């Protein structure tokens, strides 16, 4: 799979995950912060965090390799944190499928970002080899 296709899938999965969390914030809390319910602010923050990470992912792909690797690392840690929070809350599953569905998306996202990050190393090695031949 080419890196551009992989990057596109990563962007789509991250945005879908964020949009599901925004949908949950709207449907359950009408985007109002409820002091006694952490999810009322965690869901919108999750959406905002993923949108920011996607923007950084797209920007960093065109800038330095070091910055892109750092953003990829954040995109690996973020779904791990989401899954950890979900598990600590006894894995809620609103509407019968959204909890499990978002976790499946997050696991796939995690695997694809790791694959993308690993491909960055091979791409750099290929470019160095080409430069040495020239």
Image (cartoon, rainbow, N blue to C red):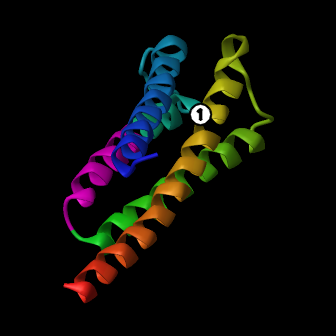
Compared across the picture, whether 95 is left or right of 12 comes to: right
When the figure is inspected, residue 89 is found, relative to residue 115, above or below; the finding is above
Name the residue rendered at 25%, 86% in the picture: 133
Percent from the top left, x then y, of residue 129? 33, 82
Q: Residue furthest right?
A: 90
Assign the magenta stretch its main secondary structure. Answer: helix
Residue 56: percent from left, percent from top: 28, 53
Residue drawn where x is 38% and y is 61% of the image: 71
In the picture of the structure, the residue carrying the numbered disc 1 is: 105
Task: Name the foreground residue: 120 vs 16.
Answer: 120
Residue 65 in view here = yes
- Asked if the stretch drawn in magenta spans residue 35, the answer is no
Q: Position of residue 99 (x, y in %)?
A: 68, 26
Q: Nearer the viewer, residue 52 or 131?
A: 131
Q: Which residues are magenta?
A: 48-63
Is the residue marked by circle 1 packed among few (<14), some (14-19), or many (20+) residues within 10 Å? some
Image point 50% across, 23% down: which residue?
Answer: 20
Q: Classify mark 1: helix, strand or loop.
A: helix
């Amino acid at each position: 799979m080419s890196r551009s296709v992989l990057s596109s899938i990563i962007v789509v999965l991250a945005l879908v995950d964020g949009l599901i969390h925004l949908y949950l914030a709207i449907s359950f809390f009408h985007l109002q912060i409820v002091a006694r319910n952490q999810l009322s602010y965690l869901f919108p923050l999750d959406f905002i965090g993923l949108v920011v990470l996607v923007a950084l992912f797209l920007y960093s792909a065109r800038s330095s390799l070091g910055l892109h690797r750092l953003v990829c690392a954040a995109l690996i840690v973020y779904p791990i944190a989401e899954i950890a929070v979900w598990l600590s809350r006894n894995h809620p599953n609103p509407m019968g499928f959204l909890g499990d569905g978002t976790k499946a998306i997050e696991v796939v996202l995690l695997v694809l970002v790791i694959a993308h990050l690993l491909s960055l190393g091979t791409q750099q090695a290929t470019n160095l080899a080409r430069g040495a031949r020239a």
